[in-house]
Image (cartoon, rainbow, N blue to C red):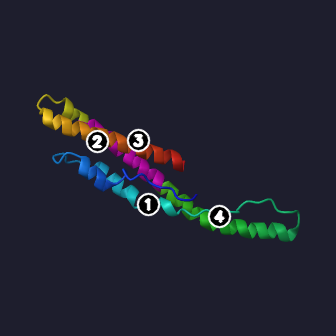
């Protein structure tokens, strides 16, 4: 697979620095932390797992041995990608929910203009995070 670089904006610390101080929900932060735990930069893939053998017993037996070895590499890689898919989906869902919550505060008539600006900036950051997570999902599907 090679290096699967996860966008730097998909980091919990970055979200924490952008969200309003009085915004209590930690759902997006926790979803981002779950994604951060998965190392997509080191997902191994066998280079020559599938080649067409010549029609001989020794060639076919050799190919089967190589395929079994390739499966041992691919199975953990598949598990890692499934974890990443679940984590990135969690980030998308949390970012969407966060945006919805922030928009409610923005639309509340009791919210000051200064607070609205802070919440709008955080809302835009949450939407950007959702977009980056969606992009990651499309890469690993």
Q: Nearer the viewer, mark 4 or mark 2?
A: 4
Q: Which residue is mark 2?
A: 98
> Percent from the top left, x then y, of residue 39?
46, 62
- Of the residues under marks 2 and 1, which one precedes in the sequence? 1
Whether residue 26 can be seen here:
no
User: Could you tell me residue 53's position as x and y percent?
Assistant: 82, 62
Which comes before the other along the chain, label 3 or label 2? 2
Gap between marks 4 and 2, in whole Å? 40 Å
- Place of residue 98 in the rendered image (x, y in percent of width and height, measured from the top left): 28, 42
Return the residue at label 3.
131
Which residue lies at the image location 61% right of the left edge and 62% below the top edge? 45
**Distance of label 3 from label 1 (alpha carbons):** 19 Å
Say if mark 4 contacts mark 3, CB within 8 Å: no
Nearest to N terminus: mark 4 or mark 2: 4
Query: Would you say residue 103 sits in the magenta stretch?
Result: no
Q: Residues within 10 Å of mark 2 (few under 14, many from 20)?
A: many
Q: Main secondary structure of the magenta part?
A: helix
Is the Cβ of the residue at disc 3 closer than 8 Å to that at disc 1?
Answer: no
Residue at image mark 4 = 46
Q: Residue furthest right?
A: 56
Q: Secondary structure at mark 1?
A: loop
Q: Is residue 89 visible?
A: yes
Q: Nearer the viewer, mark 3 or mark 2?
A: 3
Which residue does the numbered mark 1 point to in the structure image?
38
Please tell me whether residue 128 is drawn above or below residue 47 in the rendered image: above
Q: Answer with the quarter of the image where residue 48 lies.
A: bottom right
Give the CA separation, mark 4 to mark 3. 31 Å
Q: Which span of residues is magenta-colored?
A: 84-102
Characterize the local packing of mark 1: few (<14), some (14-19) or many (20 or more) Cα atoms within 10 angstroms: some
């Amino acid at each position: 697979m090679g290096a699967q670089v996860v966008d730097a904006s998909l980091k919990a610390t970055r979200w924490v620095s952008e969200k309003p101080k009085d915004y209590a929900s930690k759902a997006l932060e926790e979803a981002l932390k779950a994604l951060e735990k998965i190392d997509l930069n080191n997902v191994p893939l066998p280079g020559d797992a599938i080649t067409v053998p010549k029609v001989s017993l020794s060639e076919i037996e050799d190919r089967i041995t190589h395929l079994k070895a390739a499966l041992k590499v691919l199975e953990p890689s598949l598990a890692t990608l499934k974890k990443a898919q679940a984590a990135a989906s969690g980030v998308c869902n949390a970012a969407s929910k966060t945006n919805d919550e922030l928009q409610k505060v923005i639309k509340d008539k009791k919210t000051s203009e200064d607070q609205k600006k802070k919440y709008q900036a955080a809302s835009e950051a949450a939407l950007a995070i959702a977009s980056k997570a969606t992009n990651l999902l499309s890469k690993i599907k």
